[in-house]
Amino acid sequence: MGVEPLRGSPYSLAATGSCPRVSQSTNLFATRHRSSPSCRVAEAAARVRRGQTGRMGSIWLALIAILALAAGCRFVPRRDPVPEELAAARRLCNQGLCAADEQDLARAETLLERAVTSCPTDIDARQHYADVLWKRGSKVEAVAQIAKALELAPGDVGLCLQGGKMYMELGLFDDADRLSDDAVRNAPQSAEAWHLHGQVALARGRPADALADFHRALAVAPDDRSVLLDTAEVYRLLDKPQRALATLAILGETYGPNQVPAEVLALEGLAQEALGRPDDALASYRRARDKGDASPQTAERIAALSPEGLTTSSVR
């Protein structure tokens, strides 16, 4: 199946607790876990449904509305579904999320597909379904679900971020660019939106633009590890190894003792090499290797910089 073009805006992999708009006579079932605020909404709605009305009915309905707002539910303009359809979709979605939590993605996919079929206008169901499809490798199908969700909620920032990341990974940079543009336009104070915008710029060969976007992201979230790592990499690509090292030092402070990942240490080694510090670089590469998950490039740099490697190289 082909990738359905997105109309209006993009998406993101973090699911938000949204609920479709329903009529006053329709019960609201949350797709979240039982401990979440949205599940308390479901419990309150269920109590009304069981017949706890009369003089207490208005109180319960008011409680449902308050809890819905506290849970951050999205209310999307649409025709109210038949109550049974909505109830079935939310039950299936809940079961699908539980299956995903248990790493049973095949069962989660089946349940979430049924949820979408039961209530096609449920944005949450489509977003969770897309997430599971993506994790199972059905990436084109996942993008199609996000596109459908965006038709229901144009400009939704979460969907824009999720879609933008998916498109970027698929190499569809025009679509990723459009979605990231929508994300920063609709959420200019979102570090995640600016980060994605910069990542797309970097993927398209515009490191200077990417750096500007990463700085905007850091102005909002100065300790964001993924943004700091990408910022250091851009400094290295722009031949500013000293700035790269300074950024990596800030990043390193966000970790505990001996907790700095191999990726960060390897990038530190590259910056030190660029500054003409082979001994420091070799020490960083070896620390990265000792983490056990270093890239093959790290082993190559160790071989090239170690005394044995240098001797062998000179003999050749």
Image (cartoon, grey):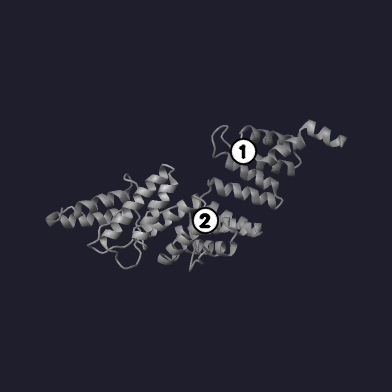
**Residue found at the far left of this picture:** 55
What x and y, as percent, mark residue 284? 67, 36
Return the residue nearer the eye: 9 or 213: 9
Look at 62% across and 43% down and name the residue there.
Answer: 248
| Residue 63 seen from this side | yes
Q: Earlier in the sequence, mark 2 or mark 1?
A: 2
Judge left or right: residue 16 versus residue 139: left
Nearest to the eye among marks 2 and 1: give it: 2
Q: Are marks 2 and 1 in contact (CB under 8 Å)?
A: no
The disc at residue 262 is 1
Distance, label 2 to label 1, CA atoms, is 29 Å
Q: What amino acid type is highlighted by mark number 1?
A: Ala
Q: Secondary structure at mark 1?
A: helix
Residue 239 image position (x, y, % from top left): 72, 51
Is 199 positioned to the left or the right of 13 in the image? Answer: right
Can you say whether 147 is above or below 32 in the image? below
Q: Residues within 10 Å of mark 1 (few under 14, many from 20)?
A: many
